[in-house]
Image (tube, rainbow, N blue to C red):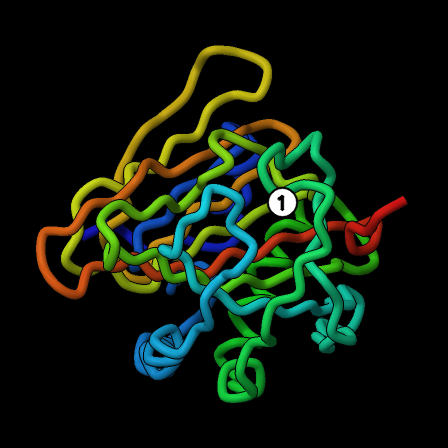
Amino acid sequence: MSNAIFPSEAAERLSHAGYAFLPAADALAAFDLRLEPLNGLRETWSRLPRDTYLRDGGRYRSRRHGCFVQDLSSAALSAAPRRPHWQPTSYNALHGGLERWFEPIEAQVVNAAVWTRLVTSIGSVFASIQHVERWFIEAHQFRIDTEAGIGRPTPEGAHRDGVDFVALVLVERRGIRGGETRVFDANGPSGVRFTMTEPWSMLLMDDARVVHETTPIQPTAVPGFRDTLVLTYRAGGFQAPG
């Protein structure tokens, strides 16, 4: 079992390498999270609508999306009006340039106290590295399944997201093999590869310094799926055309 860490240690790891992988015990300790209320959110991943925008023709991804603003002076988190998810083609060659409208994250999730603590605690760690007044946050619930065979967590390949920081949270993994996460220096050949298997383990990334991807998954049982939460933090407002 890993030793519990403080938020400053998570920030130090991230500052040093451009990424920090936190096993579940470290993540829960660093962000002062309790396992029981987090697990209370997990079943909402089973109700995610299909992603109808996949340009590879696949039907392996389901998702919901929400936008939030974190005020660092008051630690308040507020929901932003519903808006499309948009990325330039320079960051997402496959789906960039599209205004993608996804169904919002359920009220059961965004109204939960543990959700606010999760999102703001991570944001506070990022703000200790890059001092900002507020974060513009996009939250994505993903389920990648193997119902049709192979599921692709990152069909766009190795990429950056066009934000300041990214948090990838593993929520559940069942009946699959594969799904290796890869993080590489954006300006050099060095990198790491590992497979996230433990619910509530987290990967924090400095989006300017690293590129990342996750390899396809294949079924070993039915059902087979990989559930994640991706949170992106940007100081300059939400990404939008123009």
On the rendered image, what quadrant is the C terminus found in? top right
Name the outermost residue toward the right.
Answer: 242
In percent of width and height, residue 200 lies at 34, 61
Which image quadrant for residue 30? bottom left
In percent of width and height, residue 219 lies at 15, 51
Quick one: SS at disc 1? strand
Which image quadrant for residue 28? bottom left
Would residue 13 be visible to someone looking at this image?
no
Between 86 and 76, which is closer to the camera in this rendering? 86
In percent of width and height, residue 128 lies at 67, 49
- Residue at 24 percent of width and 59 percent of height: 147
Q: In the rendered image, which residue does mark 1 sit on?
A: 165
Between 62 and 108, which is closer to the camera in this rendering? 62
In the picture, measured across the screen, residue 238 lies left or right of residue 203, that is right
Between 15 and 85, which is closer to the camera in this rendering? 85
Which image quadrant for residue 207? top right
In the picture, measured across the screen, residue 103 lies left or right of residue 199, that is right
Between 113 and 51, which is closer to the camera in this rendering? 51
Amino acid found under the numbered disc labelled 1: Phe
